[in-house]
Amino acid sequence: MTQPVATLSNTSIAAAKVKDFGQFLKRLLKSPSAKMGGSICLVLVVTAIFAPVIAPHDPTELGVGAALTPPNSEFWFGTDEFGRDLFSRMVYGSRLTLYVGLIAVGISMTVGVLTGLVAGYVGGWVETALMRAVDVLFSFTETLIALAAVAVLGPSLTNAMIAVGISSIPFYARITYGAVLVEKNKEYFKAAQAVGAQHVRLLFRHILPNILSPIIVVATVGVSVAVLSASALSFLGLGAQPPSPEWGAMLAAGRDYFKRAPWITTFPGLAIAITVLGFNLLGDALREALDPQQRT
Amino acid sequence: MTRYILKRILSGIFTIWVTTIAVTLLIHLVPGDPVQIMFAQSQSTTPEQIEQIRSQLGLDRPIYEQYFMYMGRILQGDFGTTIRGNQPVLELLLVRLPNTLALALSALLITMLVGVPIGFFAAYKRGTWLDTSLMTGAIIGISIPSFWLGLMLMYVFSIRLGWLPVSGTDFKNLILPAVTLGLANAAAVSRLTRSSMLDVLSQDYMRTARAKGLAETLVLSRHALRNGLINVVNMLGLQFTYMMGGAIVVENVFAWNGIGRLAIQSIFQRDYPTIQGFILIFATVVVVVSIVLDILYVWIDPRIKYS
């Protein structure tokens, strides 16, 4: 007797979800921010995937042109102090940018969401200890946490990614924790608990899917934060090391030739700004589409 | 209110205490032998000297003993000495701290002076071209990396126009770093102010003020701005924390002699006593200033009752 009812309610819930998703998609596609942000992100992804096809030269090949050649028809973005083609370096740099953004967000989201889920679900001293630790991390800036992590691990792009990932954990933990507290008091959760669902099932089948929306929004904006932080670390010399075509590192290398060849610093900076703008716009659009009441 | 202040101070002390533990553990988390790594760049260090430093830093003792040793020394104002040059770490940090604070606070002022009016006008002209352009500007603003903005400002105002010096330590040298850091955060503050003002502008008391025939400027200054500013003051603590974090990067763009620049140099040199001192001082400043600003907020807005 229970089974058909459950199936029926599951079907109607699934139908409602599809309808909700349709409305969400409609709202998202209408938004100019989503179109603009989505296009920027798409260009970044396509550039990263097809870098070997798009780039006319090897990004680390020295002397493909004369050193410090200004932008021209052959070298669209000019060349650097070693005569490397800046356009090719920028194209390959998009791979590192995307890689950094996704890995760093992956780290912070996984650890942060798990921390928030466990703290909110288990309660008691576990909740107090975990959320107190998150509060302490929160009271420092992300920059300080990232610097401390790089100081321990040593300067490299991989370590910068890990550092940036660690520094954003508190954001995801707080958002998830708050959302879990709300969901725990809802009828569906109490019903699932009453029929004896296991902890893992309650957490991952019931709570997590219902709190995904705010996490997705934070993660989208999180990519832009990660790209900014990692490029800042590379700019400071604590992330990607030469001859890596990472945009922050390229920008730092161009500082010495700032007066004679401003294009070395201009193009990587613009690329970082446009990428970050793309994820910010997409994040804003997602937030508005997922929660139209929040629209201001 | 006294209870809230007390609670806030206790939580600040707790944060600083946790930082002292983290700072002691930091050196043990380093993969490999931290002393070997610290001296990897200097060829002349003998194994005996390395052992001597290990014992000086207390690294040959159990970790809890190291913690108590470190705490004992810190409470007496001894943060150790730099690995190269043997200079007292606390002295180095305290000499540079006022520079970082000057940068962070002047940037905070610029952030508020630019961000708040933009947010206010965008909210007041909601849905118009002005709102759209200001908010488009704001989202572009939050996407620009501060180090790049700094370099571009330096290119225009120092190299091209020659109005301001590229680097140095006097007041004139503070302008570009402060503007860079201030503008980088003004964009975020304008977005926060706009949403806070939108909330205020839709309140019933706004309609009442207009209905009783008050002039629009009075409605805006007495009712809207005053209430909207309460939320802005609430942001100050968090914004100051961001400024301190941002200062680390901006100091390195303009060679501003603050603790952030020292920190980056110490990380390059793997000078752990200085890195530890920096984290501790930075965390303490952030915690203390945030508490002061939070208390100021409660004092400004007596409607709020904190438990």
Image (cartoon, coloured by chain):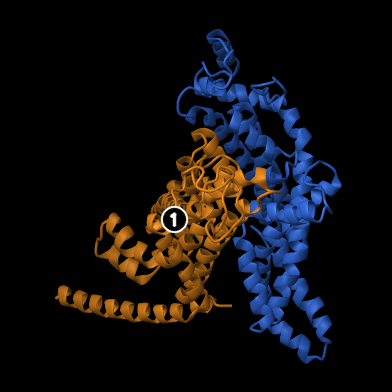
Chain colours: A orange, B blue
Number of marks in picture: 1
- Residue A34's spot in the image, x, y percent? 48, 74
Judge the density around disc 1: few (<14), some (14-19), many (≥20) Cα neighbours within 10 Å.
Answer: some
Outermost residue toward the left in this view? A1
Residue B240 can be seen, yes or no: no
The residue to which callout 1 is attached is: A56
Q: Quadrant of the N terminus of chain A?
A: bottom left
Q: Residue at x 66, y 82 (%)?
A: B129
Identify the residue at horizontal 83%, vertical 81% (top origin): B218
Chain to which mark 1 belongs: A
Callout 1 amino acid: Pro
Closer-to-camera residue (B247/B120): B247
Residue beneath the point at 55% across and 39% down: A238
Residue located farthest toward the top when viewing the structure as drawn: B48
Based on the displayed image, in which of its 4 quarters is residue B297 positioned?
bottom right
Return the residue nearer the eye: B256 or A200: B256
Residue B183 shown left or right of residue B70 in the figure: right
